[in-house]
């Protein structure tokens, strides 16, 4: 018969434990909430109160339900209070010695039938289980931060966990309104193995001063639609916890350099800059435990001392693919005169631009005259000479390197002096295109995140030769379109792709290793981390050939073994399984 969980214990009421207490108590389960000292207990109680008060203020919890929730929680110091519970969830710091000690104690204190669960993010559940005399009753129960919000729970079974224990814990997850994904015991499980490589890489970019903290976070929220930027998320997770998770994954997950903690994380932990919990991490907060960011010396000032910009009214767009059509539509809808040069002739490009306007750019405008006016601002051309009087050129041809270099040499010949020549490339070094012209100071990258209609971020990519004036002009043009810009160096992948594609590649590696399936991995990232799309759904949408090309460029530049394209990605591309557009990628797509 399935176990009834009427009374559970939670050990450690920090960032995760307090949220886990809330999840149980909200769902009618009595909780014994245990901390190590009266002070820590008071902090845990305050965290629960803050969270439930916030839920009441936002209309998500009735006052009576909040009071009933609190009445279900029995706050206690010391593990002895857990002698009569049906299940214990441990959420103490990520240290194996500490967790093993606590599990040995719990084994002594709790009833013989009590299930013991750990919320560890990266430690071996097996290593913890064998510290008890009941390893068959030990599981991982990995909640995500914030526990009351995130739907996913990874249920980790070891080689000795009893099947009925897993079944009962899965049923409990459902009762708590969570989606339980059951997996084997491996460092980082699904979500953290994918999330932390990305977070660590983001810290490295920041540490290398490749990009500011605000731009880095904006890159991933505006450029990829993630709920939080990586540095803000690390502050939420806690730098000490993040360090321990990375360190464990590095040591027990095959010494993958993507998990070797960036030196800055260690330094911040040593300095006590642990994130929100200490009031300071990558950002500064108004007090410890608060989510309210306050300005500090690193906060950018509003004043922009940009040098003079060149006025841009006429824009040339070169290319006949989706990006070129979207850009022509975006600029024309914003009131610019556009000269669209398409290799397939005006007719093909015009159809795509009309679709772009209908589906996105002027979608919210019920009056078709807006679309018609935008279309009327576009001149369809089939020769580069017609770009002689434009003020800015956007190249969106996605061509081979040699072809694109030749194209820039031609643009240099036909365009008037001082015109900014921009490439939208994701894979070519911008400096190579700049050096194909006699005006490298006027050449830069304008990387519009895709889909261009939905994502508002533009990466302004400057080379070692780009002039401040060209950069200022590019930023001003994007600002006039209502787009957010970030300025970054000419490195493979810039910021967004440099962080996004290795994570997608890691997901493919995980799939190929047989650890989890396409659906479970996608669920882990959408339900556990709040991502808008799982990695395989995203890869199928982007195109596996595009992903492979970007990943190759990243690997070519860095030679980091962890960035080598996953062989499975290569095989699927070779087999023609290119994603949604081809009808098949990681999933079958019918009715395209
Ligand atoms: N922070 C996250 O985003 C996150 C997400 C998922 C899982 N986890 C995992 O959850 C666990 C806890 O992480 P956290 O970030 O909440 O840590 P935390 O440092 O915020 O909280 C740990 C709490 O445990 C308490 N504690 C320490 N020793 C204790 C003992 N002997 N008895 C009772 N309480 C004790 C501490 O006083 C502290 O309040 C870790 O295993 C971590 O990997 C963390």
Image (cartoon, rainbow, N blue to C red):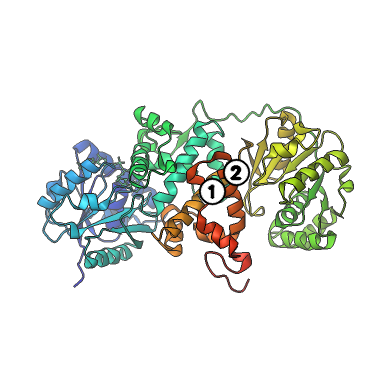
So how many labels did they put on this image? Answer: 2
**Residue that label 1 marks:** 500
Residue 344's x, y, as percent?
81, 60
> Is residue 137 positioned above or below 123 on the image?
below
Please rate how many residues cluster around mark 2, counting C-alpha atoms within 10 Å: few if below 14, some from 14 to 19, many from 20. Answer: many
Task: Report if the CB atoms under discs 2 and 1 are less than 8 Å apart.
Answer: yes
- The residue closer to the viewer here, 8 or 138, is 138
Left or right of 440, for residue 157: left
Residue 522's x, y, as percent?
46, 60
The image quarter in which residue 510 lies:
bottom left
Q: Quadrant of ligand 1?
A: top left
The image quarter in which residue 200 lies:
top left
* Element carrying mark 1: helix
- The residue closer to the viewer here, 23 or 196, is 196
Q: Earlier in the sequence, mark 2 or mark 1?
A: 2
- The residue closer to the viewer here, 137 or 152, is 137
* Element carrying mark 2: loop
Left or right of 464, for residue 67: left
Looking at the image, which residue is at 70% across and 28% down? 306
**Residue that label 2 marks:** 493
């Amino acid at each position: 018969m399935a176990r009834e969980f009427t009374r559970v214990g939670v050990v450690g009421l920090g960032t995760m434990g307090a949220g886990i207490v809330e999840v149980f108590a909200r769902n009618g389960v009595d909780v014994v909430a245990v901390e190590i000292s009266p002070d820590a207990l008071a902090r845990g109680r305050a965290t629960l109160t803050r969270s439930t008060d916030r839920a009441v203020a936002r209309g998500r919890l009735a006052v009576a339900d909040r009071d009933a929730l609190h009445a279900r929680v029995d706050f206690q110091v010391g593990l002895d209070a857990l002698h009569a519970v049906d299940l214990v969830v441990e959420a103490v710091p990520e240290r194996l010695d500490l967790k093993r000690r606590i599990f040995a104690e719990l084994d002594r204190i709790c009833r013989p039938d009590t299930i013991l669960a750990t919320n560890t993010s990266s430690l071996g559940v097996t290593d913890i289980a064998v510290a008890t005399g009941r390893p068959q009753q030990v599981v991982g129960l990995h909640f995500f931060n914030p526990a009351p919000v995130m739907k996913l729970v990874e249920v980790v079974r070891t080689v000795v966990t009893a099947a009925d224990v897993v079944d009962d814990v899965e049923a409990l997850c459902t009762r708590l309104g969570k989606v339980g994904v059951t997996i084997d015991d491996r460092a980082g499980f699904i979500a953290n193995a994918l999330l932390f490589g990305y977070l660590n890489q983001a810290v490295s970019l920041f540490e290398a001063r490749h990009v500011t903290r605000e731009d880095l976070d904006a890159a991933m929220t505006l450029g990829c639609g993630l709920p939080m930027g990586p540095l803000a998320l690390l502050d939420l997770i806690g730098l000490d916890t993040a360090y321990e998770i990375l360190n464990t994954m590095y040591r027990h997950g095959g010494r993958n350099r993507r998990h070797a903690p960036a030196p800055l994380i260690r330094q911040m932990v040593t300095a006590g800059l642990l994130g929100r919990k200490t009031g300071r991490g990558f950002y500064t907060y108004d007090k410890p435990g608060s989510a309210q960011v306050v300005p500090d010396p690193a906060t950018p000032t509003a004043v922009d001392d940009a040098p003079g910009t060149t006025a841009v009214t006429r824009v040339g767009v070169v290319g006949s693919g989706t990006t070129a059509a979207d850009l022509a539509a975006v600029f024309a809808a914003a009131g610019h005169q556009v000269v669209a040069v398409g290799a397939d002739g005006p007719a093909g490009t015009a159809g795509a631009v009309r679709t772009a306007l209908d589906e996105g750019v002027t979608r919210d405008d019920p009056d078709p005259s807006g679309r018609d006016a935008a279309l009327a601002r576009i001149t369809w051309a089939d020769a580069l000479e017609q770009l002689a009087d434009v003020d800015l050129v956007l190249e969106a041809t996605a061509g081979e390197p040699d072809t694109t270099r030749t194209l820039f040499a031609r643009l240099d010949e036909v365009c008037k002096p001082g015109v900014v020549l921009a490439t939208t490339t994701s894979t070519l070094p911008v400096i190579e295109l700049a050096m194909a012209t006699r005006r490298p100071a006027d050449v830069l990258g304008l990387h519009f995140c895709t889909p261009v209609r939905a994502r508002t971020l533009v990466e302004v990519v400057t080379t070692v030769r780009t002039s401040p004036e060209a950069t200022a002009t590019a930023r001003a043009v994007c600002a006039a379109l209502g787009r957010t810009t970030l300025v970054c160096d000419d490195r493979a992948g810039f910021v967004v792709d440099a962080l996004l594609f290795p994570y997608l590649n890691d997901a493919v590696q995980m799939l190929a290793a047989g650890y989890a399936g396409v659906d479970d991995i996608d669920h882990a990232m959408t339900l556990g981390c709040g991502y808008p799309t799982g990695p395989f759904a995203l890869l199928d949408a982007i195109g596996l050939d595009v992903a492979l090309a970007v990943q190759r460029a990243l690997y070519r530049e860095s030679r980091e073994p962890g960035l080598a394209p996953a062989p499975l990605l290569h095989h699927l591309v070779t087999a023609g399984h290119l994603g949604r557009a081809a009808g098949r990628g990681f999933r079958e797509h019918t009715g395209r």
